[in-house]
Amino acid sequence: MNRIACAACPLFPLAARLRAEPELAGEALAIVEGNGQAARVLAATRAARRAGVRPGSTLTQARALVPKLVARARDIECEATAQEVLLETAETFSPRVEDGGPGVAYLDLHGLDRHYRGKEPAHGGIGREEPERELGKALLHALDRERLPVRVGIASNKLAARTAASLFPTPTVVPAGHEPAFLAPLPLERLSPSIEIAETLERWGLRSIGELARLPAAEVASRLGEIGRELHASARGLDLRPLVPRSAPPDFREGMMLEWPLVNLEPFLFLARAALDRLCRRLETQGLGCARLEMSLRLEPDGVYQRSLTLPSPTRDTKTLLTLVRLDLEQHTPGAPVVGFALTAQPDRPRAAQLSIFGPAALSPERLATTLARLFALLGPGRVGSPALADGHRPERFALADFRPPPPPRVRAQPPRARGLLAVRVLRPAVEIEVNTRPAAGGSPAFLRPVRPPALPADPRAVVAVPSRQRSAAAAGSRPAAGASPRIEGAVRVASGPWELEEGWWTEAPVRREYWDVELDGGGLYRIYRDRESDLWLLDGIYD
């Protein structure tokens, strides 16, 4: 026989608001609906109820009883978020969960008894605690951690489970097959009949569910029609409504309506941080991360301002998300006071990290995402990414692609065997050098002077090069400062070239170069080129 659990949150509008503002839990608080004199109390905290504040009374009557009563308008955004949290927490216990309306969730307990075998009773008692009661307590504790006080009822159908969830103490477990006996002494209001049907049953003299169940089913159906037949079946503990599992939403949402319009950024960030904390806890429960954060601001009087922030890697770091929100709002101000907000996280699986047995741990994907997200926010779009090959001949030409590091390899690759190839260390930007084509007598290197010849001589062995930023240091015979460009000086022993390059001849700034590979007599193999447009010599790379 199937078993169903019902988690019902009493005073749900109040619980949803206290989840967003937990600091008001100890205050005399009332949730009101309506404006001005028409505002009426929907729910109130225990401190307010002790002072006489009751649901249905006007806000003026409530303030007459409690002058310091804190009033909050009913927040549909908070209630929708709290309902999602209720269902998400229930889904951690059962894969089949039905949305029963505001503050109500139904769970299919089929097959879960093997995970809750029951505990030994305390103080040497006899028997074991029921597995279903243990499951109900675990569900209560899980929802308490989410600041949602609920009551749990367990029975064989949704009607009995919902009725059991409204009783105290909680959890209330109705044994299988005992649903009629459980419902019999309860008043007829538990069946939620319409006003006309309730008045008819009262004229018949019926007060309890058991009295209705003892009437002949055919007589009730002939007088009340189809509604009477369904009520009579419910009174006998028969509920033929199946449990309909819900489909999980594609995103996670947190938000609230503000009591006063906000015009400064810091107060808004204070409230957004609390919302992001709740959002990250929900993502962590599901094992997901935020891949894109959508921000929707309600502006005074009837405006809406929306922004979308894409992260380079899914993350659950609150500081990263808050930094992104702050930097984005500093660059793109809404332009009007904010009266409400909603933060929506598009989830994705976090990137796997490479574990290490020996040595320091690998870089965490979340820390990498944090750094990249800050760079994106500070530098702007199109300024952060991975270099990629571009269609062109210039060695320094590249394109900027999205940064998407590949996942770590499952098997360690064997390093390739060396083939005696040279590697070039490319200098970016290229270092300007001076080429002297006047060889000294006897083949010794000529004195370096800032002479820039119009062309490379026929004999490449006469070329002498030095970085132009170190000409004065070379002339004085002193060493260059630490961190300066590499020192290159000497006569060319072997030269290969030129390799001519011409690109972008149809543009205003075409590229015309002559590339040479030169080896100096003092050692060292370098790649240099002459820019025909500026008639400058530049060091492009060093061969290792």
Image: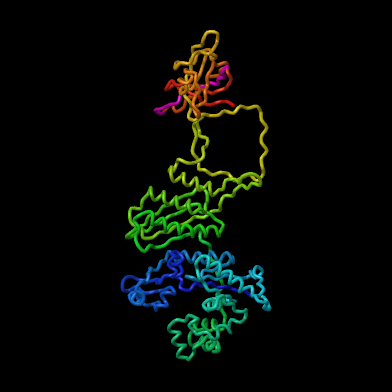
Left or right, 370 with reference to 54: right
- Relative to 52, say whether 313 is above or below: above
Left or right, 36 with reference to 234: left
- Relative to 400, say whether 97 is above or below: below
Quarter of the image that includes the N terminus: bottom right
Residue 44 occupies quadrant: bottom left
Which stretch did the figure color magenta?
507-521
Name of the residue lying farthest toward the top? 441
Residue 512 inside the magenta-drawn segment: yes
Depth check: give the residue in front, 410 or 478: 478
- Residue at 66% x, 34% y is 416
The x and y percentages for residue 110 are: 63, 70
Residue 177 in sight here: yes
Quarter of the image that includes the C terminus: top right
> What main secondary structure does the magenta stretch of the protein show?
strand
The x and y percentages for residue 119 are: 65, 72
- Relative to 453, say whether 261 is above or below: below
The x and y percentages for residue 420 are: 65, 27
Left or right, 344 with reference to 233: left
- Relative to 398, say whether 366 is above or below: below
